[in-house]
């Protein structure tokens, strides 16, 4: 076993009523790596993230994170092991303030009792302020998250994951529906985030991929058809045929 | 003191609770006779259920159509104790088997069933009023929430359990008193609960217990747990994938709501003087949800007021128009859902601030500034 790898996925397989959404996948992510996963619709990109975070259960194969098997672990245990996942549509608590959204996501009081007797510490306050600066929401802390723009909600959800300080962060189409300035700000955000953790990003937008990506994995029909530096992958014939060509 | 006030939800809550306490414990006793006061006490027992529903339905998003189960468990536990106390061998000397409750004798039961034995002890009865509903709610909650059963399925299943429980109680007449319930209750530890003075004292005890439940609910809702409830209601997956075991949280809030309902049920038995399956079945359970919805399912104080007012109008209207009441109740529920989903409390919080700020402008006052971190958006 190669201990340098943070995430090792071997022979992963999942079938929905006989349809193999992921088919014998081998996928490795190093610590402090930013990996972009691309592929046409239905290639299995979101399913791959669902499998890693436990939302969908594998029908075969292994997912090892820090030498720990994830395939049988409950969802909240996977999070506690250090895996954070952002959903495709922004999932924030719209009836709570931005501050409360971040605070609820902070680790430390995750059982019934500890959440009943939870008290805010000065350290947590400054941590929330720090995260808020990172995600460009310092001025929005006291407003309810439902009032944020679409792009700000996406950032907030990223912030809610950052406060958990995960070793692996998975983002499903973080710039979908964003304006050009928001997209640039998000690229800068991702480049800062990746400094102390591994990040997996699913993305459709090839320009954005080129802006953030070094190593790219291309999925097609549940299998990897190409993997490597973004320029090399973009020039690959099969990739052009199934994905980039149209 | 300031820290305590903040922990329990700020000045507004304290003012609300003080107003409620004054209304219930000073004004109402001053203006009504003992007959009415006893009726008010009965309405207040439904407020316990409504407050529990605010926690688990309004904030947690778990709609239980079976809170009558727990109201009934609490009420029956208390009734069993009182019935045993009323069934001394002397008082039941004319029975075939003296010393057992009269309905058992009528049904040719000759020995006290084993599950009645603990209710000879008042201490065990008090424990049973809390522990039995808590364990039962935990079992239901654990079985369903761990399997991710929720929403409308949970509502239907709890409703079905309420129906099953009524059928069971009615069917096992010899052990439960059947459709008539457990009647002819007289004394609590030798103290006659049917006298005017006893009824007054029980009314006050009921008020104090309700205020404690309101205070506990406020604490719960103002804690991190309270915000988690809202988060779970709105984005359950986000909470789960933030490292929380969502099922545990849901089980806990359901147990708390059920224990509140059981305490209400016990006070119901004490003040009304009997307990029967009609107070705990499907219709009663749905009425409890209407109480909560009319008062405002996001406000504990609102729900308590709603329970009180709707049960009051029920008594008044069903005396005058017995056939019309169910229709009116249904119409009220539809109106609440369609036109004011946050109930009476929602109407108050929509219109009261305008009135208040107008008053402040006239009086030349400035609104107090709050702690930004603790501030909550309007819900």
Image (spheres, coloured by chain):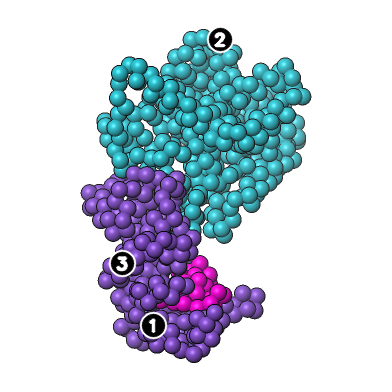
Chain colours: A purple, B cyan
Q: Quadrant of residue B82?
A: top right
Q: Are marks 1 and 3 on the same chain?
A: yes
**Which is nearer the N-term, disc 1 or disc 3?**
3
Q: What label sits on residue B33 in the rendered view?
A: 2
The residue wearing badge 1 is A230
Q: Residue B294, position in %: x, y?
A: 58, 31
In the image, B19: left or right of B193? left
Q: Dot 2 falls on which chain?
A: B
Task: Answer few, some or many: residues within 10 Å of disc 1's Cα (few below 14, many 20 plus, some between 14 and 19).
Answer: some
Q: Are marks 2 and 1 on the same chain?
A: no
Do residues under tags 2 and 3 come within 8 Å of each other at their CB atoms?
Answer: no
Q: What residue lies at 26% left-to-right and 52% top-to-bottom?
A: A129
The residue wearing badge 3 is A188
* Front: mark 2 or 3: 3
Q: Residue B270, position in %: x, y?
A: 56, 25
Q: Residue A62, position in %: x, y?
A: 46, 80
Q: Is residue B355 above or below residue A30?
A: above
Q: Dot 3 falls on which chain?
A: A
Q: What residue lies at 60% left-to-right and 33% top-to-bottom?
A: B339
Q: What label sits on residue B195 in the rendered view?
A: none
Q: Secondary structure at mark 1?
A: helix
Q: Is residue B120 above or below residue A142?
A: above
Q: Nearer the viewer, residue B339 or A122?
A: B339
Spatial distance from mark 2 to mark 3, Cα to Cα?
73 Å
| Highlighted range, magenta | A36-59
Do residues under tags 2 and 1 come within 8 Å of each other at their CB atoms?
Answer: no
Q: Is residue B323 visible?
A: yes
Q: Secondary structure at mark 2?
A: loop
Q: Nearer the viewer, residue B4 or A99?
A: A99
């Amino acid at each position: 076993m190669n201990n340098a790898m943070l995430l090792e996925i071997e022979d992963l397989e999942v079938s929905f009523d006989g349809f193999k959404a992921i088919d014998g996948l081998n996928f490795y992510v190093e610590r402090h790596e930013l990996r972009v996963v691309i592929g046409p619709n239905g290639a299995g990109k979101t399913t791959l993230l669902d499998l890693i975070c436990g939302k969908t259960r594998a029908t075969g194969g292994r997912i090892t994170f820090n030498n720990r098997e994830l395939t049988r672990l409950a969802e909240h245990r996977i999070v506690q092991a250090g895996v954070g996942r952002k959903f495709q549509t922004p999932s924030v608590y719209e009836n709570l303030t931005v501050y409360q959204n971040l605070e609820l996501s902070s680790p430390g009081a995750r059982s019934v009792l500890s959440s009943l007797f939870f008290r805010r510490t000065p350290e947590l306050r400054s941590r929330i302020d720090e995260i808020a600066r990172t995600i460009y929401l310092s001025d929005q802390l006291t407003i309810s998250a439902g009032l944020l723009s679409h792009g700000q909600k996406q950032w907030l959800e990223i912030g809610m994951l950052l406060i958990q300080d995960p070793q692996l962060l998975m983002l499903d189409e973080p710039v979908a529906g964003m304006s050009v300035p928001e997209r640039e700000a998000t690229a800068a955000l991702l480049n800062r985030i990746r400094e102390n953790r591994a990040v997996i990003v699913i993305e459709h937008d090839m320009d954005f991929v080129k802006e953030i990506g070094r190593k790219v994995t291309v999925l097609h029909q549940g299998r990897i058809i190409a993997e490597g530096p973004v320029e090399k992958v973009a020039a690959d014939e099969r990739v052009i045929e199934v994905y980039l060509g149209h | 003191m300031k820290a305590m006030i903040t922990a329990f939800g700020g000045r507004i809550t304290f003012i609300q609770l003080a107003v409620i306490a004054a209304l219930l414990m000073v004004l109402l006793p001053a203006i009504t006779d003992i007959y009415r006061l006893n009726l008010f006490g009965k309405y207040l027992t439904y407020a316990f259920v409504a407050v529990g529903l605010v926690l688990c339905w309004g904030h947690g998003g778990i709609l239980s159509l079976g809170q009558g189960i727990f109201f009934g468990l609490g009420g029956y536990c208390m009734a069993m104790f009182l019935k045993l106390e009323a069934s001394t061998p002397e008082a039941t000397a004319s029975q075939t088997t003296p010393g057992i409750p009269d309905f058992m004798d009528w049904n040719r039961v000759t020995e006290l069933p084993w599950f009645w034995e603990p209710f000879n002890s008042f201490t065990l009865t008090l424990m049973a009023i809390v522990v039995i509903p808590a364990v039962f709610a935990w079992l239901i909650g654990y079985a369903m929430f761990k399997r991710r059963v929720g929403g409308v399925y949970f509502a239907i299943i709890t409703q079905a359990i309420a129906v099953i429980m009524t059928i069971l109680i009615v069917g096992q007449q010899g052990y439960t008193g059947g459709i008539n319930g457990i009647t002819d209750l007289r004394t609590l530890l030798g103290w006659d609960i049917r006298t005017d003075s006893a009824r007054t004292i029980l009314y006050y005890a009921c008020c104090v217990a309700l205020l404690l439940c309101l205070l506990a609910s406020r604490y719960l809702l103002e804690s991190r747990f309270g915000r988690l409830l809202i988060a779970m209601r709105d984005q359950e997956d986000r909470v789960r994938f933030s490292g929380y075991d969502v099922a545990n949280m849901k089980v806990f809030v359901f147990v708390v709501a059920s224990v509140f309902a059981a305490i209400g049920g016990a006070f119901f038995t004490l003040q009304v003087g009997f307990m029967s399956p009609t107070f705990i079945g499907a219709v009663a359970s749905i009425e409890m949800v209407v109480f909560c919805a009319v008062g405002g399912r996001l406000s504990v104080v609102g729900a308590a007021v709603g329970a009180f007012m709707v049960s009051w109008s029920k008594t008044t209207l069903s005396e005058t128009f017995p056939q019309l009441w169910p229709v009116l109740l249904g119409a009220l529920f539809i109106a609440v859902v369609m036109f004011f989903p946050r109930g009476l409390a929602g109407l108050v919080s929509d219109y009261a601030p305008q009135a208040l700020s107008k008053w402040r402008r006239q009086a030349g006052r400035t609104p107090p500034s709050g702690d930004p971190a603790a501030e909550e958006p309007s819900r």
